[in-house]
Image (cartoon, helix red, strand yellow):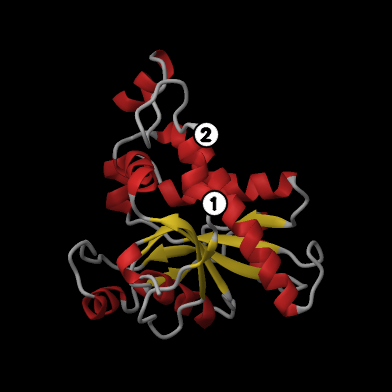
Amino acid sequence: MLTTVLDLILPPRCAGCAREGAVLCPACLAEVSGDPCPRPPTAPPRGLPGCWAGASYEGATRRAILAYKERGRTALARPLATCLAITLTTALGTLTTALGVGEFGRPFVLVPVPSSRRAVRLRGHDPVGRLAVLAARRLRSLGWPVTSAPVLAQRRRVLDQAGLSAPQRAANLAGAFGVRRLAGAGGRALWGRPRPIAVLVDDIVTTGATLAEAAEALNRAGVPVPLAVTLAATRHHQR
């Protein structure tokens, strides 16, 4: 992809503010990850897990996510995964305290919300899946027992969510996700003992319909999902 090649041969410019020197400068990196907290939609759909995000979907955060997801700036995967890991550590610390288990005593599995095959083909990469892999790797380096497991898949085609209302999004996604039992550490961990904590991972939360439907698919497969973590949340849907 041309954008990826240009990132390698030209001085990098920040995706958030266009300054030269880094694909995401320290100031914009701080904006994307600087305020991890619960950011549920104002009218959360039934079944939505606890929903955390690192920032509001605006300004440098919005520009960086769009550059990574839609414009081929794949070099942003690592800094954005670091931002996601910061939000995850904050959220997981709260969750483990609430569950009464030790911080490092129970495994976690990051489950990315899947893109459609068509979207992956058009973009040339799987943005959320890559973030989950890199965030899990980052957390493991800090001592957290974390793996990633791309066990969710779209079972049917869905419409583009842009422009749909909350009820329309929910109807569009109803029954759209299925669960695959994958080989590998992440897949085995989901159904292992001790039972891990499954955490949904996505880039943006808007109405929460996607996360709720993904959680429902995992619940049907016997995997409880107490938490979802995203890079950003749209401001007009936050509490």
Q: Residue at x 46, y 76 (%)?
A: 217
Question: Residue 172's quadrant in the figure?
Answer: bottom left
Q: Looking at numbered disc 1 in the image, what kind of residue is underneath it?
A: Leu
> Residue 57: x, y in percent?
36, 55
Query: Which residue position is annotated with label 1?
Result: 84
- Residue projecting furthest to the left: 163
Secondary element at image label 2: helix
Question: Residue 18's quadrant in the figure?
Answer: top left
Q: Looking at numbered disc 2 in the image, what kind of residue is underneath it?
A: Pro
Give left or right: position of 9 versus 130.
left
Q: Residue at x 77, y 73 (%)?
A: 194
> Residue 41: x, y in percent?
38, 74
Give left or right: position of 134 versus 141.
left
Name the quarter where the N terminus is drawn.
top left
Regarding residue 183, the answer to whether it shows in the image is no
Identify the mark at residue 25; answer none if there is no mark: none
Query: Which residue position is annotated with label 2?
Result: 26
Secondary element at image label 1: helix
Of the numbered discs 2 and 1, the one sitting upstream in the chain is 2
> Which one is nearer the viewer's eye here, 232 or 59?
59
Q: Residue at x 33, y 35 (%)?
A: 72
Regarding residue 60, the answer to whether it shows in the image is yes
Q: Residues within 10 Å of mark 1 (few under 14, many from 20)?
A: many
Question: Do labels 2 and 1 touch, CB within 8 Å?
Answer: no
- Residue projecting furthest to the bottom: 46
CA separation in Å, label 2 and label 1: 15 Å
Name the quarter where the C terminus is drawn.
bottom left
> Residue 73: x, y in percent?
37, 33
From this view, report whether residue 109 is shown above or below residue 195: above
